[in-house]
Amino acid sequence: MNLSEIKDIAKEKGVAPGKMKKDDLIRAIQREEGNNACFGTDARSCGQEGCLWREDCLKLC
């Protein structure tokens, strides 16, 4: 998912993207959704199989 798409999602969730980097913006969205802000940590052990960001996260780990 590209940064423009992520910013659109952030705005829909009420998160002001400003000049946040992709990782920080995704974590802010995760917090707003009431989830663990774990993007980019260890996707294999986070337990959030249905996470919107899982595919991108797995690429980082």
Image: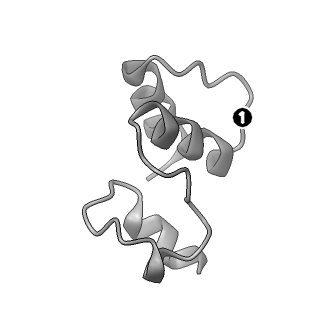
- Describe the element under mark 1 as helix, strand or loop: loop
Identify whether 13 is placed above or below 26: above
Question: In the depicted view, which residue is nearer to us: 4 or 42?
Answer: 42
- The quadrant holding residue 44 is bottom left
- The quadrant holding residue 3 is top right
- The picture places residue 28, in percent across and down from the top left corner, at 57, 36
> Is 32 placed left or right of 41 in the picture?
left
- The picture places residue 49, in percent across and down from the top left corner, at 28, 69
- The quadrant holding residue 8 is top left
Residue occupied by mark 1: 20
Question: In the depicted view, which residue is nearer to us: 17 or 47?
Answer: 47
Which quadrant: the C terminus? bottom right
Q: Give, as a three-letter code, the residue at label 1.
A: Met
Question: In the depicted view, which residue is nearer to us: 34 or 28?
Answer: 34
Identify whether 3 is placed above or below 19: below
Q: Which residue lies at the image location 42% right of the left edge and 46% below the top edge?
A: 35
Identify whether 44 is placed above or below 41: below
**Around disc 1, counting alpha carbons within 10 Å, would you say few (fewer than 14), some (14 to 19), or many (20 or more)?**
few
